[in-house]
Amino acid sequence: MSIPTVAIVGRPNVGKSTLFNRIVGGRRAIVDDRPGVTRDRNFASANWGGREFWLIDTGGWDAVGNDALTGAIRQQIEAAIAESDAIIFVVDSKVGVHPADQEVAQLLRPYRDRVLLAVNKVDELPDDSSAMAFYELGLGDPLAVSAAVGKASGDLLDALASLLPGEAEDSDPDDAVQVAVVGRPNVGKSSIMNRLLGQERSVVAPEAGTTRDAVDSPLRYHGRRLNFIDTAGLRRRSKVEDEIEFYSSLRTRRAIDRADVCVLVVDATAGVNAQDLKIARLAWDAGTGLIVAVNKWDLVDEKNASNAAKGQREVEERAPFLRAVPFLFESAETGLRVRKVLDLILEVAAAREVRVGTAEVNQVLADLINRNQPPQTPGKEVKLLYASQIGTKPPTFAVVSNRPDVVTESYRRFLQHGFRAAFGFKGTPIRLRFRRKRGR
């Protein structure tokens, strides 16, 4: 990546995610008093003094646990440290030097020239001297901060900026295609992400719900920057049992809201259920492009595999808007057709940006009216006078009528289908805005 990266590391519950939120400006990472809430590496773009950088929030370092998930989190932290241009090591002033702090310090010693030691929860600055105890870690001068209230965070960021390497000229992330990978829990969203990115950037474990935060990971493909957002699985509200699940679902919805394209991952062995359709509708109504990735296709027997087209038609009958959406039958486990996701993302993102000339729009509108006049009410003639495209992302058209309030919903859908047939708009919703002709 051309933008410098900064990793925030430390043992559980020292305030890493609070500091992450403080730096990026907003609640991008889940914060809770219980340790272990953050599991994956969470990427976000940040800026200080005109310097752009990627900030990485990591899970808490736990050397005691020996289960597979704890081991995967440790690997995540080690990978974040190795990849980063600068590292913020967060410790807790209220607890003092903890044995786990010593372990993390030992891990960081080979990188000490790019490590900042942030002593968090020092709320009584400048009178509180508890940060001095952390000199024994051997990682330079401790920097006292209070992430919760923002005290001395500017000093920390000034020190950070001095460690960052120079930025490349093409480091502006604003042209990135934002891609939200969404779906129910345990359908393989993180596995697809890891296959696409070529590394274990999201924690993958057999139990459902491993990913809790929405995790951002950048990738460049065919000269275009893609920013992938791997999200916690969306469950029905009745299945959201505690506030961690609730905030995970909330962040998934926010990820959809900021996405250009959503990749809805469904389980080929379970089929498309009502919750999958609800997630698809949520993304479609938000105006994002949409791709349906049917994962675990390697587990479907040959007989059922031959019925893929039939199954797709059945899904489209239940949710007609999906007729405009590309389906991809793939397997994150074997890599079958997974790379095709990237091509589809670029196609759908391009479709969202298409702009059609006014003359061409009006010719299509006239052809549609000649084919099927709008429903009329006695004594209330409805005329569609002209139309033009007024926006992109998603494509949006204004249709001027003498009586826009009485144009039926079915006729609006007829026009949408007609515009799509004429102009394409693969995988992206089309919005029509009916307006009244202004009086002379």
Image: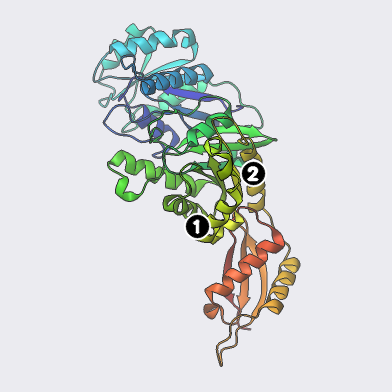
Taking the spot 34% from the left edge, 16% from the top edge, the residue there is 66
Who is closer to the viewer here, 341 or 49? Answer: 341
How far is mark 2 from mark 1, CA to CA? 20 Å
Q: Secondary structure at mark 1?
A: helix
Tell us which disc is closer to us: 2 or 1.
Answer: 2
Q: Quadrant of the C terminus?
A: bottom right
Who is closer to the viewer here, 97 or 270? Answer: 270
Whether residue 302 is visible, yes or no, is: yes
Query: Residue 106's quadrant in the figure?
Result: top left
Query: Residue 386's quadrant in the figure?
Result: bottom right
**In the image, residue 397 lies at what x, y percent?**
62, 65
**In the image, residue 121 lies at what x, y percent?**
28, 25
Q: Residues within 10 Å of mark 1 (few under 14, many from 20)?
A: few
**In the image, residue 229 lies at what x, y percent?**
50, 38
Kind of residue at disc 1: Asp
Q: In this view, which residue lies farthest toward the front?
A: 303
Dot 2 corresponds to which residue?
344
Kind of residue at disc 2: Leu
Q: Quadrant of the N terminus?
A: top right
User: Does label 2 or label 1 sit earlier along the sequence?
Assistant: 1
**In the image, residue 235 lies at what x, y percent?**
37, 46
Taking the spot 69% from the left edge, 74% from the top edge, the residue there is 368
Dot 1 corresponds to which residue?
285
Q: Is residue 44 left or right of residue 22?
A: right
